[in-house]
Amino acid sequence: MIVCFKRTYDYLVTPPQQDDSAKSLILEAAQRLFACEGFEKVSLRMLTQEAGVNLASVNYHFRSKQGLIDAVISGYVNPVNEARLARLDAAESESSGNALSLDAILDCFMRPVLEAVHESQISEQLFFQLMGRCMTNQSLKTMPAAVLELFREVVVRFPLALRRALPDLSEKESLWRLHFTVGVLIHVLIHTEGLLQLAGDRLGKPSLDNILTMVKDYCQAGLAAPKTKLETNDV
């Protein structure tokens, strides 16, 4: 009872900022901190200090830290997956029933990430770090339901497109190769800035479009590699 009374007293003394500006400040601060520190390391105190709001405002708009994490993940991952599926729909519609090229499939899968960078309110480096964390630091069990639903559709549609382009691929192998492709993309998102720092002037300053082209060329070779021969023959 004492704890409940204390929380109620604090809430009354520092009422939440209920306007949309407070919600935006919290989201912007969360994006920056989650990108730099990761989801686990960021405390609510760090968030309120960065956003310049009180704890009651965070609880009012997002109910909890996990609610805030869900909002950030949904806001970053869902638009990318929606754009992937929309691009794939458009490409398949324009192909008149013919199989898409590997380049076209990979462009549908990867370009939405670049488009999201340009629309983001944070820097390219922070965006890539945050997107990478959204895709690696959260287990499927903790992903918001709406995010999981879109991911499942992506994991159905893109392997089907791959199998049409590469008829010799089994369903299992197409899923594995898409999984490996996602791994490449996540690595590039998280570690490109580090590579540029380590390499100094040797890599220059490649544009996002040039990096995307290199990633697609690399992944095309992996997707089109000869069928994997395993002892168990389960691929």
Image (cartoon, rainbow, N blue to C red):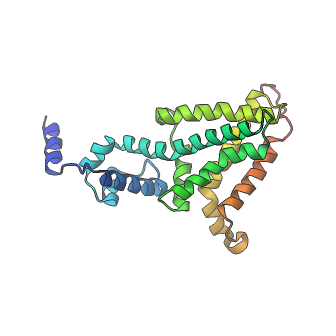
Q: Of 77 and 140, which appears nearest the observer?
A: 77
Which quarter of the picture shows residue 117?
A: bottom right
Q: Residue at x 32, y 55 (%)?
A: 21
Give the quadrant of residue 6: top left
Viewer-nearest residue: 49 or 43? 49
Q: Residue at horizontal 47%, vertical 32%?
A: 145
Q: Residue at x 42, y 51 (%)?
A: 41
Using residue 234 as the reference point, say whether residue 120 is left or right of it.
left
- From the viewer's perspective, is 8 left or right of 66? left
Regarding residue 54, the answer to whether it shows in the image is yes
Q: Nearer the viewer, residue 218 or 156?
A: 156
Query: Could you tell me residue 135's position as x and y percent?
Result: 56, 44
129 sits to left or right of 154:
left
Residue 71 shown left or right of residue 48 in the figure: right
The percent coordinates of residue 180 (x first, y second) are 70, 42
Q: Is residue 175 visible?
A: no
* Residue located 25% across and 53% down the image: 54
Farthest residue, direction right: 226
Residue 78 image point, x, y percent: 52, 41
Q: Is residue 205 above or below residue 37?
A: below
Q: Most extreme residue toward the bottom, as rendered?
A: 201
Instruction: Give the quarter of the figure containing the N terminus.
Output: top left
Q: Give the quadrant of the C terminus.
A: top right
Q: Is the residue 121 above or below the residue 205 in the image?
A: above
Marker count (numbered) = 0
Residue 68 lies, in percent from the top left, at 38, 45
Q: Is residue 232 above or below residue 50?
A: above
